[in-house]
Image (tube, grey):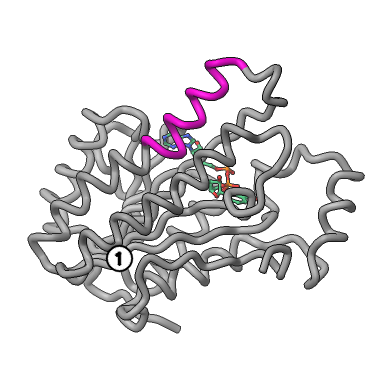
Amino acid sequence: MFKLENQVALVTGAARGIGRRVAESLADAGAQVVLADFSDWEEDITEIGKGIFGVRLDVTDPARVKEVVGNVVQRFERIDVLVNNAGIVRDNLLIRMKEEEWASVIATNLNGVFFLTKEVVAKMMRKRYGRIINISSIVGQMGNPGQANYVASKAGVIGFTKAVAREVASRNITVNAIAPGYVATPMTENLGEKAKQDLLGMVPLGRMGSVDDIANGVLYLASEEAGYITGHVLNINGGMYM
Ligand SMILES: NC(=O)c1ccc[n+]([C@@H]2O[C@H](COP(=O)([O-])OP(=O)(O)OC[C@H]3O[C@@H](n4cnc5c(N)ncnc54)[C@H](O)[C@@H]3O)[C@@H](O)[C@H]2O)c1
């Protein structure tokens, strides 16, 4: 598999689910990985395993994002890989959707990606190397009833990815998105049995995705071998959307 020795990675929303597995697989590939999440860990960067560090970070807070990115660079000297993974859902039909449900999803899923990318890209530019991977969603491509806020945020992430990819390509920084299909994580565990069966009926490969399916894609896009790929949206969805 791909090697990330001597590299430093920052993964948001990494306390559980996809982010956790992504962080572990980057660490397995040899990177030093900082896991950031608002639900675990201390304010200071703390070693929680071999080559794995945790830090408390709310991605919706730009001042704190700046502080944490600064602290990571102070401690490890650089950031080679950024995975913008933190995300939330607040589902509701549009006519019932409260302003808070709209605003909180945009704040985490889209503003958070902006804050992190802006800070990290400035550090990557100096080193003339970087890999940014934004976790979007299949529904950002297909649409989904009851998720206008989430879909808008995830479609926004795809547009953001392409714009920034063009801006920073000359600095040897690639920016790509991954659009997962339905993946078994705490985010999707509350789906009813019927909804799950209906969804599986739409997946040609006939199963839900695993966190490893997504982590493998992130690892590839984070690798030096993926250096000629930028502005791309990698579908990891079992064929549900082609
Ligand atoms: N599970 C799926 O089927 C699926 C499908 C497509 C896309 N995604 C996307 O993948 C990403 C990870 O999803 P998951 O299923 O692992 O979700 P999850 O709910 O299991 O984990 C999300 C993590 O993000 C953290 N987080 C939320 N808001 C944050 C904030 N403001 N600051 C810092 N951390 C925050 C949470 O604490 C949690 O640890 C999300 O962006 C999600 O939208 C998931």
Image coordinates of residue 158 in percent, x first then y, are 45, 53
Question: Above or below — where is 129 with respect to 114?
Answer: below
Left or right: where does residue 197 sit relative to residue 240? right
Q: Does the magenta stretch include residue 104?
A: yes
The residue that appears at 60% across and 68% down in the rendered structure is 213
Q: Does the magenta stretch include residue 16?
A: no
Image coordinates of residue 182 in percent, x first then y, are 69, 54
Q: Give the prevailing secondary structure in the magenta stretch.
A: helix
Question: Above or below — where is 15 with respect to 162?
Answer: above
* Label 1 C-beta lies within 8 Å of the nearest ligand 1 atom: no
Q: In which quarter of the image is residue 36?
A: top left
Looking at this view, is 186 or 48 the one in front?
Answer: 186
What is the quadrant of the N terminus in the image?
bottom left
Image coordinates of residue 91 in percent, x first then y, are 67, 29
Magenta residue span: 98-111
Q: Dot 1: within a 10 Å radius of its alpha carbon, few (fewer than 14), some, or many (20 or more) residues?
A: many
The residue that appears at 56% across and 59% down in the rendered structure is 179
Query: Of the residues shown, which amino acid type is indicated by label 1?
Result: Arg
Image coordinates of residue 169 in percent, x first then y, are 22, 68
Left or right: where does residue 81 sit relative to residue 37? left
Q: Mark 1 points at which residue?
A: 131
Looking at this view, is 181 or 67 the one in front?
Answer: 181
